[in-house]
Amino acid sequence: MTVSGTTSATPQPSSTSSSTGGERRGTKPLDIVLGVVVGALVIVAVLFAEPVIIGGVLLVVCGLAVFRRQFFNWTTMLFLTAAVVLFIPIRRYALPIEVGFALEPYRVLIAGLLVAAAVAFLGRGRDRWKPTVWGWPVAIFLWTMFASLMINSVALTQSGLITGGFANVFQLSFLLSVIFLTRQMLSTETITMVLLNVIVFGGAIIGFFAFVERVTRQNVFLMLANFLPLTILRDDAESIRAGGNRAYASSQHPIALAVLFCMIIPIAIYLIKYSPWPRFSFTRKLVYIGAMGVTMIGMLSAVSRTGVVTLGAMFLFTLIFWPKVAGILAAVGVPIAVVVGLLLPQLFESMVLSLFDIEGVIASQLTSPGMAGQGRLADLPEAFAEFAAAPLAGTGLGSRIVVGDEANAQILDNQWLGTLLEAGILGIIGLAALLVYPIVRMVHFSFRSDAPIHRKHLTFAIATSTVGYAAAMFFYDAFAFMQTLLLLAILYAVAAWAMTTPADGWTPPRLRQRPREAVGATA
């Protein structure tokens, strides 16, 4: 029988044994990986970089070594990933280290996280792997892309395009791995809510500086090299519409920037009700309505009709499944649109009123037939003729080159059509698995599950963002503009967290079917 008084009689380890035990516990697989990475960075810096860069790298390495426990943890990496995706323009910056290709920050970060996740998986085992929900949709999408490549492998090899096809499959796999990485880094509800706030207020910051860019023609996101150890790859982005420059901000193109803002709007609406901060409802509404207002100003600065169409698709989706919310949004949005039209008539006419001129829209999309950059409708006859020649698997992923000296195809500005031509019916099946199935699954969870109401509303908000992304894909080459795809991957991970993580009084169905011990360990 155990009594409380016997505790003091229990033999205590000596200082020697304690020290030995500490030495045994001192070396961990993650420490070894970090040591190897740090050593590799130093060696590469010494061999390939300038003395000033060497000093900077060593300074950063020393700082990371000192604060490794604060920096090298999943929570820090989660927010760093969100910051890199939102604020560092893709295809604009690279690390100042020559290795034969551009070391873009997002590539380096995702690659490092993949290595860390592999080490953690080997160390902790499969039982600690958090469910990601979207494994099969991603797998089906990638396999359809790979199948189109294999079916056309002979023709692609003869034309020398097979390498580009494999590179495209690898790039898509690399980008979509963010779904699984982000899901593993999401642990508590507090961390998830902070991540959503980072996305919303990050969008507001980008929107503000997009407005500044529209007014001053100065993109502050192309000045990051003045503060960070980055090399500018190119800064020649410029587009004029509605009497001024269209804002690029942290995106690759104004259309992609507008789509980014549209995808953030449903998350901001969700946080109006469920964000833990500010605590008072009225203050919380003011804060998030203000954030949405700045975000919408940023979208106006991008001067993109695609953004308006994306908002319309999301509103129609909400109207079908949640008419009450759609009515509230219409009651708030219409007066704001009227005010914007009065204050910025030229901008409002270019983005909104021009869409009601059906004949003018059709004429604008039929311009320059046979020339590079012809209208989207002018692309259709030739595109469908090309599809009819290879309907099942298309001409092969990576077979269409639209820029550069080796260009062999028109720029379609339509990801659905481009995938249809490159991967055929198989490719459309893959896109449906990647985009349509998750929407259906999230809507089903939002209206049919017994989950807490805040979880169901969160999945509906993410489903709305996904609808916006899928609709916008008809108007730009979505996979070539990685920022929006990476944001979608992060939102998919948040949806997976909402659908699989237990909450007070609720256990996900898949956990109910597992043994009680496993449920406790997962929780």
Image (tube, grey):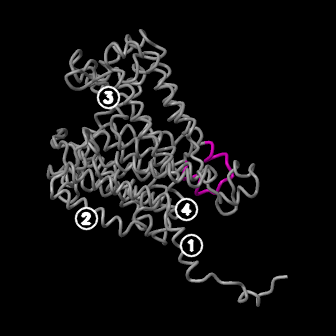
User: Which label's residue is closer to the chain start, 2 or 1?
Assistant: 1
Which dot, 4 or 3, sits closer to the camera? 4
Residue assigned mark 3: 413
Residue assigned mark 2: 59
Judging depth in this view, the residue of 209 and 116 nearest the camera is 116
On the image, the x and y values in percent for residue 307 come to: 34, 40
On the image, the x and y values in percent for residue 136 come to: 58, 36
Tag 1 secondary structure: helix
Tag 4 secondary structure: helix
2 and 1 marks in contact (CB < 8 Å): no
User: Which label's residue is closer to the chain start, 4 or 3?
Assistant: 4
Which dot, 3 or 1, sits closer to the camera? 1
What range is drawn magenta here?
A: 444-459
Amino acid type indicated by mark 2: Leu
Q: Is residue 314 above or below residue 167?
A: below
Residue drawn at (32%, 40%), measured in percent from left and top? 256
Q: Is residue 239 above or below residue 226?
A: above
Judging depth in this view, the residue of 452 and 36 nearest the camera is 36
Q: Is residue 130 magenta?
A: no
Q: Is residue 66 above or below residue 428?
A: below
Label annotation for residue 189: 4
| 136 left or right of 225 in image | right
Judging depth in this view, the residue of 46 and 264 nearest the camera is 46
Amino acid type indicated by mark 4: Glu
Q: Is residue 455 magenta?
A: yes
Mark 2 neighbour density, 10 Å: few (under 14) some (14–19) many (20 or more):
few
User: Which label's residue is closer to the chain start, 3 or 1?
Assistant: 1
Residue assigned mark 1: 21
Mark 3 neighbour density, 10 Å: few (under 14) some (14–19) many (20 or more):
some
2 and 4 marks in contact (CB < 8 Å): no
Residue drawn at (15%, 59%), measured in percent from left and top? 52
